Amino acid sequence: MAAIEGARPAGRTTPYGILCVDDEEAILESLELTLGGEYRIFTATSAEEGLEILEREEIALVISDQVMPGMRGVEFFEKVIERNPRAIRILLTGYADMPSLIRAINEGRIYRYIPKPWEPDDLRIAVKRGLEVYELSSENAALADALAEANERLRAENVYLRREVEGRYSFDGIIGDAPAMRRVFDVTEKVAQTDATVLLTGETGTGKDLLARAIHYSGPRKEKKFVAQNCGALPDTLLESELFGHKRGAFTGAHVDKKGLFEVADGGTIFLDEIGETEPGMQVRLLRVLQDGEIRPLGSSETRKVDVRVIAATNRDLKKMVEEGRFREDLYYRLRVVEIELPPLRDRRGDVPALAHAFLDSSAKKMKREFTGFSNAAMDRLVAFDWPGNVRELGNEIERAAALAGPGGTIGLEDLSEHVRGPASRSGAASRSPLGAEGALPGRVGEDGLAGPIEDWDLNRAVDRLKRRMLVEAVREAGSKSRAAEKLGIPRQSLQKMMKRLEIGDDELTAPSETD
């Protein structure tokens, strides 16, 4: 008969350690003679001695006699399990005592029992197979540990990403200090804490999608899903399937059941962009969801309840469409429980510098480049331009300029698109005063950080001078940054960002004494 080759640990050169426990020295010698050529053998004449060895040595398999003075084999295995639960356990017995064997199997959780006397080859085979089981359990334990570690890392990453998303889509992440935007923030911060249906209106590119996400992630549903659908991007039949789902066989190509976005967003928020593009049939189905909180998938006769907050947006005049019979009046009033109109960028030109710098920072990070800012001429033109595509168009223009800008890190007039570099529109030229047609330009910043005589018509510097003066005076009068932010009607975080950008030091915030 061919020699039986012993089991070897995967990826290791050290043989497995085997502990043999028996009160008869002859039995231990026989075990060592049978197994010693393939494994590291440790012997003990008592269970207590065996436990001591188990504490200090790396043991993969334990062989023990059942009948020993002091502690029987089953009791010994119970203590082995406490110290090394993965060690394979083989019981030697010279008695055909079935109740004892059954107890050993159940309580000692032995891998196998071998009657005395044994055949050496039978013992070698039993040990080899037992160690193969041990190797497999070790691999499984390592995989389980790796999986637990990966799950914990994934959980931590999910928490980080959720916080990052919440921060990115919070109201603090939306740039706007113009009075029109402050009015928008006043309303949205209040409505975010409710479940009221919101209708966002305004021209294309004014940031309706960003505001919808800010409402969701600032409200009580932020732990649930936010899903968005452009209602003008799909024909009516496909839009119905996308929003309400379908059953298998509902139409050609419907091979499996599909959940609609309303069901996916259950407990969260659904954002219906370009709601004014929907057809009358779709408007009826949307009205049912808003009225009853029920959906019916295509091809199904059953309705399903959903708990979803609806935020809709449009760049169309829905009221006019209602008057013309192109939009359902009942749906219109269901949607505009709270209506928020986002102003076009040309009506808040004072926000252009801050927006442009934010877009430039984003582009620099994406392109792994460094920029110092904009030339005065470039910023003048950015502020003067009408931006028919609003904030979205401005963002695209800055990203383009950043990609084409030469070395030096400053975006100049020559880096802007030709249509932006061209003659400013009348409305843009008329807005060169940051105070508007009815105001006057602020003066040049003097040594005290306030205003001096007018010396140029640089719009970018003029806007910054006005902001600088207002911030310094507000903090001096209010006595603290928090009260100054409240007085100015802006978040404290926005005030701090502006002060950092305008390089306003703490020494400037203290009003000069009369003796100075």
Image (tube, grey):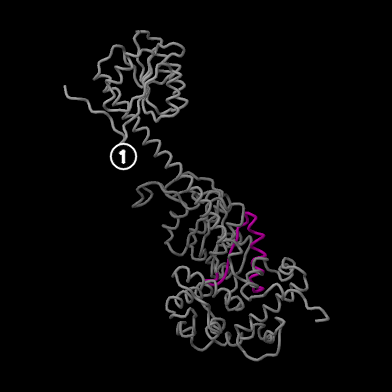
Vertical arrangement, residue 109 with respect to residue 9, above or below: above
Vertical arrangement, residue 139 with respect to residue 124, above or below: below
Quarter the C terminus occupies = bottom right
Residue bearing mark 1: 11
Determine if residue 3 is in view: yes
Left or right: residue 340 versus residue 241 is right
Image coordinates of residue 411 in percent, x first then y, are 49, 80
Vertical arrangement, residue 99 with respect to residue 396, above or below: above
Left or right: residue 290 versus residue 142 is right
Q: Nearer the viewer, residue 56 or 315?
A: 56
Q: Residue furthest top?
A: 96
Q: Give, as a single range, the part of the protein colored magenta.
A: 177-206
Report the residue at 49% width, 50% height from top.
Answer: 264
Image coordinates of residue 108 in percent, x first then y, are 42, 19
Image coordinates of residue 363 in percent, x first then y, are 47, 71
Q: Is residue 192 magenta?
A: yes
**Crowding near the residue tagged with mark 1, few <14, some 14–19, many ≥20 C-alpha atoms within 10 Å:** few
Report the residue at 61% width, 52% height from top.
Answer: 220
Q: Nearer the viewer, residue 456 or 340?
A: 456
Image coordinates of residue 212 in percent, x first then y, are 56, 61
